[in-house]
Amino acid sequence: MSAAPVKRVTVPALRAMKSQQRIGVLTAYDFPSAKIADAAGTDVILVGDSLGMVVLGYPDTLSVTVEDMLHHTRAVARGVTRALVVGDMPYLSYHVSIEESVRNAGRFIQAGAQAVKVEGGKPSRIRTIEAILDAEVPVMGHIGLTPQSVNAIGGFKLQGKNAEDARRLIEEAEALDRAGCFALVLECVPAELAAFITGRISIPTIGIGAGPRCDGQVLVLHDLLGLYQGTSPKFVRKYADLGAEMQSALEHYLRDVREGTFPTEAESFHGTSEEELKRLYGSCDSEGIVVEIQAKS
């Protein structure tokens, strides 16, 4: 009897999860990690522009290009059968003109994503998001600490600490909800503010450094698995230290190579008879080791 087909997480299905079940979101940047994250039961896999720092070695996310993102989106999409794949639109992919923004969003869909994520909620950004939505591309919003705006906001800082800033974020969240976003990432905002916004809008909130009362949570895969060697933010919980395990395994392998204990005979191919070895190479000893190379005639 064949197994029942896996039910895909869709944009409407994700919206319906609000207040019904917590939403688990992870980043992934390649085929094997996407396949593992999907098999683990992840609801949303975000191909985040964080790949610039954790995969490509860039100093920040501002260096990431559309071509970088599309390359990794294609790889992730090939490894997913259940999760909703969201492509993170990088810096300058939706900042110049609405026409270019819509075209870039469509390229993510053609690369295998089911939706895109766009940072910001000011009026000009709302107009861009509405145009992308009008092109039938679902949009996940993102407010609070928006890494692509790090130079404008003066660093990776908690947002919404004072009443004026908190009111601005509430207004942006409501505007993104009205515009038609299907979910909203809240990054690095006080837990109380995130809880207020979560109760105020009709779409799911996905927290990252925004406390426990959002509708879901997202973490960067390399952070929670201990694969990124840089400084981890306060909100990261490390569930494994695979970076240290990988280094230990590689050191063990290199030691075995240098000591001549890898590969063993059991890890080598055999099967050529002694007679064939002599025909091929000349004479060989009792263990089949060539001791004389037969001269070519």
Image (cartoon, rainbow, N blue to C red):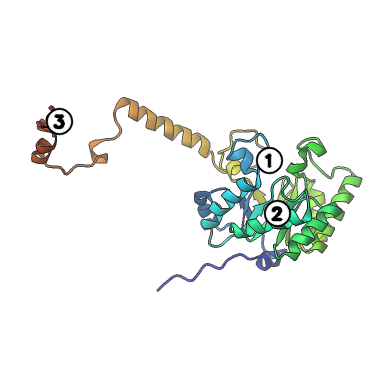
Kind of residue indicated by mark 1:
Thr
Quadrant housing the N terminus: bottom left
Report, in whole angstroms, how far the alpha carbon at label 3 lies from the one at label 2: 62 Å
Q: Which residue is mark 2?
A: 117
Kind of residue indicated by mark 3:
Val
The residue shown at (77%, 61%) is 131
Query: Closer to the N terminus: mark 3 or mark 1?
Result: 1
Q: Which residue is mark 3?
A: 290
The residue shown at (88%, 45%) is 165
Q: Which mark is residue 61?
A: 1
Quadrant housing the C terminus: top left
Please tell me whether mark 1 sits on a helix, a strand or a loop. Answer: loop
Please tell me whether mark 3 sits on a helix, a strand or a loop. Answer: loop
Q: Which mark is residue 268?
A: none
Kind of residue indicated by mark 2:
Lys
**Placement of 199 over or under 156, stated as above or below:** below
Q: Is residue 185 visible?
A: no
The residue shown at (84%, 53%) is 124
